[in-house]
Amino acid sequence: LPMEGWNGKFYQAGCGGFCGILGRADASGGWVNAMRPGLERGYATATSDSGHHALSVVDGGWAYNNPHAERDWGWRSISETNRVGNLMVDAFYGSPSQQAIFQGCSTGGRMAHVAASRFPEMFDGIISGAPAMDYPGLVATAMSWFIQANTAPDGSRILGAAEAKTIGDAVLAQCDGIDGAEDGAIADPRQCTVDYAGLGLSNQQLDTLARWREGPRNAAGEQLYPGGIPEGSEPFWFLWLTGDDKGSSPLVPAFAGGFGRYMAFDQDPGPAWTPLDFDFETDPARMTTSAEMYNGDNPDISALRAAGGKMIVYHGWADAIVTPYKTVDWYEKAAELAGGTEALSDSVALFMVPGLDHCGIL
Protein backbone atom coordinates (compact mmCIF):
# COMPACT_ATOMS: atom_id res chain seq x y z
CA LEU A 1 0.00 0.00 0.00
CA PRO A 2 1.86 3.17 -1.12
CA MET A 3 2.07 5.65 1.74
CA GLU A 4 2.35 8.48 -0.78
CA GLY A 5 1.45 8.86 -4.42
CA TRP A 6 -1.18 6.13 -4.68
CA ASN A 7 -2.52 6.28 -8.23
CA GLY A 8 -6.00 5.21 -7.18
CA LYS A 9 -5.64 1.79 -8.79
CA PHE A 10 -5.19 -1.85 -7.77
CA TYR A 11 -2.62 -4.28 -9.21
CA GLN A 12 -2.80 -8.02 -8.54
CA ALA A 13 0.02 -10.39 -9.44
CA GLY A 14 -0.21 -14.11 -10.10
CA CYS A 15 2.23 -16.74 -8.92
CA GLY A 16 4.44 -19.26 -10.71
CA GLY A 17 4.54 -23.05 -10.87
CA PHE A 18 2.67 -24.65 -7.99
CA CYS A 19 3.05 -21.37 -6.08
CA GLY A 20 3.43 -21.67 -2.30
CA ILE A 21 5.86 -18.74 -2.33
CA LEU A 22 5.00 -15.05 -2.41
CA GLY A 23 6.14 -12.77 -5.23
CA ARG A 24 7.40 -10.23 -2.76
CA ALA A 25 7.49 -6.49 -3.32
CA ASP A 26 11.29 -6.47 -3.06
CA ALA A 27 11.71 -9.19 -5.70
CA SER A 28 13.78 -8.51 -8.79
CA GLY A 29 12.24 -6.00 -11.14
CA GLY A 30 12.50 -8.51 -13.97
CA TRP A 31 10.41 -11.16 -12.23
CA VAL A 32 6.95 -11.19 -13.73
CA ASN A 33 4.93 -12.85 -10.96
CA ALA A 34 5.68 -10.18 -8.37
CA MET A 35 4.22 -7.12 -6.72
CA ARG A 36 7.13 -4.79 -7.45
CA PRO A 37 6.20 -3.68 -11.00
CA GLY A 38 2.82 -2.44 -9.77
CA LEU A 39 4.11 -0.89 -6.58
CA GLU A 40 6.79 1.09 -8.42
CA ARG A 41 4.05 2.64 -10.56
CA GLY A 42 1.95 3.75 -7.63
CA TYR A 43 -0.56 0.90 -7.52
CA ALA A 44 -1.83 -0.69 -4.37
CA THR A 45 -0.62 -4.23 -4.94
CA ALA A 46 -1.45 -7.75 -3.82
CA THR A 47 -0.42 -11.29 -4.50
CA SER A 48 -0.79 -14.63 -2.78
CA ASP A 49 0.83 -18.04 -2.35
CA SER A 50 -2.45 -19.45 -3.76
CA GLY A 51 -3.48 -20.79 -0.37
CA HIS A 52 -0.58 -22.98 0.75
CA HIS A 53 3.06 -22.91 1.79
CA ALA A 54 5.66 -24.89 -0.16
CA LEU A 55 9.40 -25.42 -0.22
CA SER A 56 9.58 -24.31 -3.86
CA VAL A 57 7.37 -23.73 -6.89
CA VAL A 58 7.88 -27.37 -7.97
CA ASP A 59 6.78 -28.75 -4.57
CA GLY A 60 3.34 -30.31 -5.04
CA GLY A 61 3.15 -32.29 -1.80
CA TRP A 62 0.69 -29.83 -0.26
CA ALA A 63 -1.99 -31.08 -2.69
CA TYR A 64 -1.77 -34.76 -1.70
CA ASN A 65 -5.38 -35.86 -1.06
CA ASN A 66 -6.25 -32.21 -0.43
CA PRO A 67 -8.96 -31.10 -2.88
CA HIS A 68 -9.67 -27.91 -0.92
CA ALA A 69 -6.09 -26.72 -1.40
CA GLU A 70 -6.28 -27.71 -5.06
CA ARG A 71 -9.42 -25.61 -5.46
CA ASP A 72 -7.64 -22.66 -3.85
CA TRP A 73 -4.71 -23.01 -6.27
CA GLY A 74 -7.03 -23.54 -9.21
CA TRP A 75 -9.28 -20.50 -8.89
CA ARG A 76 -10.38 -19.43 -5.40
CA SER A 77 -7.13 -17.66 -4.48
CA ILE A 78 -7.69 -15.25 -7.39
CA SER A 79 -11.02 -13.96 -6.14
CA GLU A 80 -10.15 -14.09 -2.42
CA THR A 81 -6.92 -12.14 -2.92
CA ASN A 82 -8.88 -9.60 -4.92
CA ARG A 83 -11.67 -9.37 -2.33
CA VAL A 84 -9.40 -8.95 0.68
CA GLY A 85 -6.99 -6.67 -1.16
CA ASN A 86 -9.73 -4.29 -2.22
CA LEU A 87 -11.24 -4.23 1.28
CA MET A 88 -7.83 -3.21 2.61
CA VAL A 89 -7.47 -0.52 -0.06
CA ASP A 90 -10.86 0.95 0.81
CA ALA A 91 -10.12 0.88 4.53
CA PHE A 92 -6.61 2.31 4.20
CA TYR A 93 -7.30 5.13 1.74
CA GLY A 94 -10.94 5.76 2.54
CA SER A 95 -12.03 5.12 -1.03
CA PRO A 96 -12.09 2.09 -3.34
CA SER A 97 -9.70 1.61 -6.23
CA GLN A 98 -10.81 3.07 -9.55
CA GLN A 99 -9.21 0.40 -11.73
CA ALA A 100 -8.05 -3.19 -11.25
CA ILE A 101 -5.27 -4.91 -13.22
CA PHE A 102 -4.18 -8.55 -13.09
CA GLN A 103 -0.76 -9.62 -14.37
CA GLY A 104 0.89 -13.02 -14.36
CA CYS A 105 3.03 -15.40 -16.38
CA SER A 106 3.08 -19.20 -16.67
CA THR A 107 0.80 -20.32 -13.83
CA GLY A 108 0.16 -16.62 -13.38
CA GLY A 109 -0.91 -16.58 -17.02
CA ARG A 110 -3.24 -19.49 -16.33
CA MET A 111 -4.68 -17.47 -13.46
CA ALA A 112 -5.15 -14.54 -15.82
CA HIS A 113 -7.24 -16.68 -18.16
CA VAL A 114 -9.19 -18.18 -15.26
CA ALA A 115 -9.95 -14.64 -14.11
CA ALA A 116 -11.13 -13.70 -17.59
CA SER A 117 -13.60 -16.59 -17.74
CA ARG A 118 -14.65 -17.11 -14.10
CA PHE A 119 -14.54 -13.50 -12.90
CA PRO A 120 -15.14 -11.40 -16.03
CA GLU A 121 -16.10 -8.22 -14.13
CA MET A 122 -13.29 -8.36 -11.56
CA PHE A 123 -10.48 -6.78 -13.60
CA ASP A 124 -10.49 -3.92 -16.07
CA GLY A 125 -7.24 -5.13 -17.63
CA ILE A 126 -5.54 -8.54 -17.70
CA ILE A 127 -1.97 -9.25 -18.79
CA SER A 128 -1.29 -12.92 -19.48
CA GLY A 129 2.20 -14.18 -20.27
CA ALA A 130 3.05 -17.67 -21.54
CA PRO A 131 -0.15 -19.02 -20.00
CA ALA A 132 -0.05 -22.62 -18.78
CA MET A 133 -3.81 -22.59 -19.22
CA ASP A 134 -4.32 -26.38 -19.49
CA TYR A 135 -2.30 -28.06 -16.74
CA PRO A 136 -3.57 -31.63 -17.31
CA GLY A 137 -2.85 -31.30 -21.03
CA LEU A 138 0.51 -29.60 -20.64
CA VAL A 139 2.13 -30.64 -17.38
CA ALA A 140 0.76 -34.17 -17.12
CA THR A 141 0.32 -35.20 -20.75
CA ALA A 142 2.77 -33.20 -22.87
CA MET A 143 5.58 -33.12 -20.32
CA SER A 144 5.28 -36.85 -19.68
CA TRP A 145 5.49 -37.35 -23.45
CA PHE A 146 8.68 -35.28 -23.65
CA ILE A 147 10.22 -37.14 -20.71
CA GLN A 148 9.32 -40.61 -21.99
CA ALA A 149 10.59 -39.74 -25.46
CA ASN A 150 13.96 -38.70 -24.00
CA THR A 151 14.45 -41.64 -21.63
CA ALA A 152 16.58 -44.56 -22.81
CA PRO A 153 15.93 -48.12 -21.58
CA ASP A 154 18.73 -47.69 -19.01
CA GLY A 155 17.10 -44.50 -17.68
CA SER A 156 19.63 -42.09 -19.20
CA ARG A 157 18.68 -39.06 -21.28
CA ILE A 158 18.83 -39.56 -25.03
CA LEU A 159 19.25 -35.88 -25.89
CA GLY A 160 21.55 -33.84 -23.68
CA ALA A 161 23.14 -30.41 -23.66
CA ALA A 162 25.61 -31.25 -26.44
CA GLU A 163 22.87 -32.44 -28.78
CA ALA A 164 20.78 -29.37 -27.94
CA LYS A 165 23.65 -27.16 -29.11
CA THR A 166 24.08 -29.16 -32.33
CA ILE A 167 20.35 -29.09 -33.09
CA GLY A 168 20.00 -25.41 -32.21
CA ASP A 169 22.88 -24.41 -34.49
CA ALA A 170 21.27 -26.31 -37.39
CA VAL A 171 17.87 -24.75 -36.75
CA LEU A 172 19.28 -21.23 -36.68
CA ALA A 173 21.39 -21.79 -39.79
CA GLN A 174 18.45 -23.08 -41.81
CA CYS A 175 15.56 -21.00 -40.47
CA ASP A 176 16.84 -17.66 -39.21
CA GLY A 177 16.39 -15.88 -42.52
CA ILE A 178 12.95 -17.23 -43.40
CA ASP A 179 11.33 -14.00 -42.23
CA GLY A 180 13.74 -11.93 -44.31
CA ALA A 181 15.99 -10.92 -41.41
CA GLU A 182 18.95 -12.83 -40.00
CA ASP A 183 18.69 -11.65 -36.41
CA GLY A 184 19.36 -14.79 -34.35
CA ALA A 185 15.69 -15.56 -33.71
CA ILE A 186 13.07 -17.74 -35.41
CA ALA A 187 10.14 -15.49 -36.27
CA ASP A 188 7.63 -18.34 -36.50
CA PRO A 189 8.71 -21.96 -35.98
CA ARG A 190 5.69 -23.18 -37.95
CA GLN A 191 7.50 -21.95 -41.07
CA CYS A 192 10.71 -23.79 -40.17
CA THR A 193 11.59 -27.14 -41.79
CA VAL A 194 15.00 -28.46 -40.80
CA ASP A 195 17.15 -31.16 -42.38
CA TYR A 196 18.98 -32.89 -39.51
CA ALA A 197 20.97 -35.23 -41.74
CA GLY A 198 24.72 -35.04 -41.30
CA LEU A 199 24.59 -33.75 -37.71
CA GLY A 200 25.88 -36.98 -36.23
CA LEU A 201 22.65 -37.72 -34.37
CA SER A 202 21.78 -41.37 -33.83
CA ASN A 203 18.49 -42.86 -35.00
CA GLN A 204 17.39 -42.95 -31.37
CA GLN A 205 18.15 -39.25 -30.96
CA LEU A 206 16.39 -38.37 -34.20
CA ASP A 207 13.34 -40.33 -33.06
CA THR A 208 13.26 -38.42 -29.76
CA LEU A 209 13.58 -35.13 -31.61
CA ALA A 210 10.71 -36.04 -33.95
CA ARG A 211 8.49 -36.91 -30.99
CA TRP A 212 9.41 -33.65 -29.27
CA ARG A 213 8.47 -31.65 -32.32
CA GLU A 214 5.10 -33.31 -32.90
CA GLY A 215 3.86 -33.36 -29.30
CA PRO A 216 1.80 -36.00 -27.49
CA ARG A 217 -0.41 -38.42 -29.37
CA ASN A 218 -2.28 -41.58 -28.49
CA ALA A 219 -1.99 -44.88 -30.36
CA ALA A 220 -4.62 -43.75 -32.87
CA GLY A 221 -2.48 -40.73 -33.74
CA GLU A 222 -4.83 -38.21 -32.15
CA GLN A 223 -3.11 -35.05 -30.87
CA LEU A 224 -3.53 -34.82 -27.10
CA TYR A 225 -2.11 -31.30 -26.72
CA PRO A 226 -1.44 -28.71 -29.43
CA GLY A 227 2.03 -28.90 -30.94
CA GLY A 228 5.39 -29.77 -29.49
CA ILE A 229 8.69 -28.14 -28.63
CA PRO A 230 9.29 -25.28 -31.08
CA GLU A 231 12.29 -24.75 -33.31
CA GLY A 232 14.38 -21.92 -31.90
CA SER A 233 13.93 -22.95 -28.27
CA GLU A 234 17.09 -25.10 -28.19
CA PRO A 235 19.28 -22.54 -26.32
CA PHE A 236 16.94 -22.95 -23.33
CA TRP A 237 16.64 -26.75 -23.32
CA PHE A 238 19.33 -27.02 -20.63
CA LEU A 239 16.99 -25.33 -18.15
CA TRP A 240 13.80 -27.20 -18.97
CA LEU A 241 14.56 -30.46 -20.78
CA THR A 242 18.14 -31.72 -20.88
CA GLY A 243 20.13 -30.25 -18.01
CA ASP A 244 23.53 -28.73 -18.74
CA ASP A 245 26.97 -30.24 -19.15
CA LYS A 246 27.73 -29.59 -15.48
CA GLY A 247 25.13 -32.05 -14.24
CA SER A 248 22.21 -29.76 -13.41
CA SER A 249 18.73 -31.28 -13.50
CA PRO A 250 16.08 -29.87 -15.87
CA LEU A 251 12.82 -28.54 -14.46
CA VAL A 252 10.27 -30.30 -16.68
CA PRO A 253 10.61 -33.65 -14.82
CA ALA A 254 10.17 -31.84 -11.51
CA PHE A 255 6.96 -30.14 -12.64
CA ALA A 256 5.54 -33.25 -14.32
CA GLY A 257 6.42 -35.45 -11.36
CA GLY A 258 4.93 -33.18 -8.71
CA PHE A 259 1.79 -32.58 -10.70
CA GLY A 260 1.21 -36.24 -11.54
CA ARG A 261 1.82 -37.46 -8.00
CA TYR A 262 -0.36 -34.99 -6.14
CA MET A 263 -2.49 -32.76 -8.38
CA ALA A 264 -3.47 -34.27 -11.72
CA PHE A 265 -5.63 -37.33 -11.17
CA ASP A 266 -9.02 -37.88 -9.60
CA GLN A 267 -7.19 -40.18 -7.17
CA ASP A 268 -3.65 -39.09 -6.29
CA PRO A 269 -1.15 -41.91 -6.99
CA GLY A 270 1.32 -40.50 -4.46
CA PRO A 271 5.10 -40.19 -4.24
CA ALA A 272 5.97 -43.44 -6.05
CA TRP A 273 4.48 -42.22 -9.35
CA THR A 274 6.77 -40.88 -12.10
CA PRO A 275 6.10 -39.38 -15.55
CA LEU A 276 7.30 -42.67 -17.03
CA ASP A 277 4.08 -44.18 -15.63
CA PHE A 278 1.80 -41.90 -17.64
CA ASP A 279 -0.48 -43.85 -20.00
CA PHE A 280 -1.48 -41.82 -23.07
CA GLU A 281 -4.44 -44.12 -23.76
CA THR A 282 -6.15 -44.02 -20.38
CA ASP A 283 -4.70 -41.26 -18.19
CA PRO A 284 -6.09 -38.19 -20.00
CA ALA A 285 -9.60 -39.32 -19.06
CA ARG A 286 -8.57 -39.59 -15.38
CA MET A 287 -8.00 -35.84 -15.08
CA THR A 288 -11.49 -34.45 -15.63
CA THR A 289 -11.83 -33.13 -12.07
CA SER A 290 -8.51 -31.31 -12.14
CA ALA A 291 -9.26 -29.86 -15.56
CA GLU A 292 -12.48 -28.35 -14.22
CA MET A 293 -10.66 -26.86 -11.23
CA TYR A 294 -7.50 -25.61 -12.91
CA ASN A 295 -7.99 -24.86 -16.57
CA GLY A 296 -8.32 -21.42 -18.08
CA ASP A 297 -8.42 -22.42 -21.75
CA ASN A 298 -12.07 -21.58 -22.42
CA PRO A 299 -11.93 -19.38 -25.53
CA ASP A 300 -15.38 -17.89 -24.87
CA ILE A 301 -14.54 -14.58 -23.22
CA SER A 302 -17.74 -12.87 -24.29
CA ALA A 303 -18.58 -11.98 -20.66
CA LEU A 304 -15.23 -10.22 -20.21
CA ARG A 305 -15.74 -8.32 -23.46
CA ALA A 306 -19.27 -7.37 -22.46
CA ALA A 307 -17.93 -5.98 -19.19
CA GLY A 308 -15.44 -3.83 -21.08
CA GLY A 309 -12.39 -5.80 -19.97
CA LYS A 310 -9.18 -5.84 -22.01
CA MET A 311 -6.50 -8.52 -22.31
CA ILE A 312 -2.90 -8.47 -23.44
CA VAL A 313 -1.56 -11.98 -24.09
CA TYR A 314 2.07 -12.61 -24.94
CA HIS A 315 4.10 -15.76 -25.51
CA GLY A 316 7.62 -16.46 -26.65
CA TRP A 317 8.11 -18.54 -29.79
CA ALA A 318 11.20 -20.03 -28.08
CA ASP A 319 9.31 -21.29 -25.02
CA ALA A 320 10.32 -24.91 -24.44
CA ILE A 321 8.24 -25.62 -21.31
CA VAL A 322 4.87 -23.96 -21.95
CA THR A 323 4.92 -24.54 -25.68
CA PRO A 324 3.36 -21.61 -27.57
CA TYR A 325 0.99 -23.50 -29.87
CA LYS A 326 -1.73 -23.77 -27.22
CA THR A 327 -1.83 -19.98 -26.88
CA VAL A 328 -2.17 -19.56 -30.65
CA ASP A 329 -4.90 -22.22 -30.66
CA TRP A 330 -6.77 -20.44 -27.85
CA TYR A 331 -6.55 -17.09 -29.63
CA GLU A 332 -7.79 -18.50 -32.94
CA LYS A 333 -10.76 -20.15 -31.22
CA ALA A 334 -11.52 -16.97 -29.26
CA ALA A 335 -11.45 -14.98 -32.50
CA GLU A 336 -13.82 -17.43 -34.17
CA LEU A 337 -16.29 -17.16 -31.29
CA ALA A 338 -16.00 -13.36 -31.29
CA GLY A 339 -16.79 -13.15 -34.99
CA GLY A 340 -13.27 -12.81 -36.32
CA THR A 341 -9.87 -11.42 -35.43
CA GLU A 342 -10.93 -7.83 -36.08
CA ALA A 343 -13.87 -8.14 -33.71
CA LEU A 344 -11.70 -9.70 -31.01
CA SER A 345 -9.02 -7.02 -31.38
CA ASP A 346 -11.14 -4.47 -29.54
CA SER A 347 -10.63 -6.56 -26.40
CA VAL A 348 -7.63 -8.86 -26.86
CA ALA A 349 -4.15 -8.28 -28.27
CA LEU A 350 -1.82 -11.24 -28.85
CA PHE A 351 1.95 -10.79 -29.13
CA MET A 352 4.07 -13.77 -30.21
CA VAL A 353 7.69 -12.85 -29.54
CA PRO A 354 10.55 -14.41 -31.59
CA GLY A 355 13.47 -15.70 -29.52
CA LEU A 356 11.70 -15.29 -26.19
CA ASP A 357 11.91 -18.17 -23.74
CA HIS A 358 9.47 -18.81 -20.95
CA CYS A 359 8.25 -15.65 -19.23
CA GLY A 360 10.87 -13.32 -20.58
CA ILE A 361 14.31 -14.94 -20.85
CA LEU A 362 15.98 -13.72 -24.04
Image (cartoon, grey):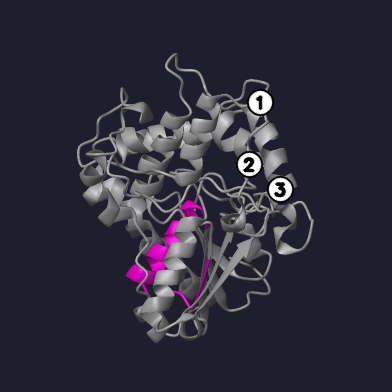
Depth order, front residue of 146/56: 146
Label 2 SS: loop
Q: How many other residues sit within 10 Å of disc 1, few (<14), some (14-19) or many (≥20)?
A: few
> Measuring 44% from the left and 82% from the top, which residue is drawn there?
340
Task: Identify the image quadrant of residue 168.
Answer: top right
For residue 95, above or below residue 91: below
Please report contact status of discs 3 and 2: CB closer than 8 Å, yes or no. yes
> Visible in this render: residue 121?
no
Dot label at residue 200? 1
> Measuring 49% from the left and 63% from the top, which residue is drawn there?
328
Q: Earlier in the sequence, mark 1 or mark 2?
A: 2
Residue 89 horizontal/vertical position (percent): 50, 71
Answer whether residue 194 is magenta in the image.
Answer: no
Residue 135 horizontal/vertical position (percent): 38, 49
* Highlighted range, magenta: 105-127
Dot label at residue 174? 3
Residue 138 shown left or right of residue 347 in the figure: left
Task: Identify the image quadrant of residue 216.
Answer: top left
Residue 76 shown left or right of residue 187 in the figure: left
Label 1 SS: loop
Q: Which residue is label 2 attached to?
A: 195
Answer whether residue 116 is magenta in the image.
Answer: yes
Q: CA distance from mark 1 to mark 2?
A: 12 Å
Q: Amino acid at mark 2?
A: Asp
For residue 299, above or below residue 233: below
Q: Amino acid at mark 3?
A: Gln
Q: CA distance from mark 3 to mark 2?
A: 8 Å
Q: Amino acid at mark 1?
A: Gly
